[in-house]
Image (cartoon, helix red, strand yellow):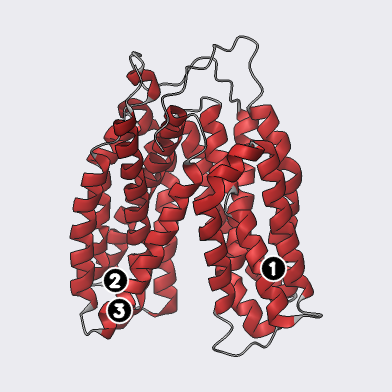
Amino acid sequence: MNPDTTALRRARIGVFGCFATSGFVMGAWAAALPAVDARLDLGEARLGTVLLLIQVVGLGTMFLSGKVADRITTRQLLRWIGPFTQLALLAPAVAPTYETLLIGAAVYGVGVSFVEVGTNAHSVELERYYGRPIISSFHGFWSLGGAAAGALTSFGLTMGLGSQTMLVAAGLACAVAFAGFARPLLPPPGQAQGGSSGAPSKAARIGVGLLAAMFALGIAGHLIESGAIDWANLHAARVLDADEALAPLSYTVFGCAMTVLRLAGDPIRARLGPGPTMFWAGAAATAGYALVLASAAAGGLPLAWAGWILAGCGIAIIVPVLFSAIGEAGGSPSQIAVVSMSGGAGLLIGPAAIGYLAEGTNLTVGLLVPAALSVFTLLAGPITMRRLLRPAPDAEPKPEAATVAR
């Protein structure tokens, strides 16, 4: 039996809230670092170690979190574990030493893996109830949550509030908020329709080769994004000699374009389908990076901004399409966790892959890495989608979609 329209709406609002809250916590961690650095006298190397530890621990425990979700369902994972992960903001707030901050960062890394897998897998399950694309907008709310954290931190500091006080208040508030948002979440479609567990249908045929292809596309997507996150502003300053006040806007225009397209991307994907959406997303990212690379020779900052906007539009829906497609193919939370792991891997590989190449040559050459991966996405994305969503010979009929709540 499918849930009614009201239950679907409430569950969707809950998932929006879980994404936004976890994005807020991530943004608050980043915004707190300057104050933590000043309080504990960390320096660049120790700060980098803290950030690296979060990524490494998160990546290392992500597959485990998928297995846990397989066993207890994503709804229970988010209800039981999600609120506690939001309390990770207490670590940068009260850690008395660098060593205790490292412990807090490791705990936060575990929390990131469980919440990321839980929210992504649950969004896939909810999309199966709706019977149409809804995942992209959830990722847009994650971005909005991170932006809100940075803005509120800046406002609070301007008003004279202490960083530690704000972090403690934010951690407690986010824990309560996440618990509230997780309450209306639904059981997996298999359970709701009378099954004994949340396991996907046996008709699902996602082999190692397809999972590897999805993982590679996920790394490509995150590396393309990393090119903008880590290097857009530096490209403007070092390559284009942009004014100090204008250079930071390079990532801003990229981030705004990406957020807007994520919020509006579901109707696009519903109209085009997964394969064509991957093609056009890769094409937009490729064209965007082409303009960025060309701006060094002619066009300067305006052409680079146009390129970053195009790249942001392209990258916005690559990862949501991957999650949606693996869910449509009947993937389990642990298989979705494999795609989630590509994010951590991409964020670990990206700065080194681009940075070391740029160090040996120049930043324009370094940005050829995300440009080439944009072409890879354009070519490999549609092929992988067709293979993933090709019906198995013995596939069971799809269950009828629930009445869609608008």
Q: Is residue 145 left or right of residue 358?
A: left
* Residue in the foreground of this view, choosing between 26 and 315: 315
Q: Is residue 42 left or right of residue 342?
A: left
Q: Quadrant of the C terminus?
A: top left
Residue drawn where x is 32% and y is 25% of the image: 3
**Among the 4 quarters of the image, the one containing residue 70:** top left
* Residue in the foreground of this view, choosing between 293 and 87: 293
Q: Which residue is mark 3?
A: 155
Q: Which residue is mark 1?
A: 307
Q: In this rendering, which labeled residue sits more in front, label 3 or label 2?
A: 3
Amino acid under disc 1: Gly
Q: Is residue 69 left or right of residue 364?
A: left
Residue 114 point in image, percent of width and height: 35, 43
Q: In this rendering, which labeled residue sits more in front, label 2 or label 1?
A: 1
Compared to 328, does 31 lie above or below? below
Residue 340 point in image, percent of width and height: 49, 44
Q: Which residue is mark 2?
A: 98
Residues at circles 2 and 1 in contact by the CB criterion of under 8 Å? no
Label 1, secondary structure: give it: helix
Q: CA distance from mark 1 to mark 3?
A: 31 Å
Tell me if I can see residue 19 in this picture. Answer: yes
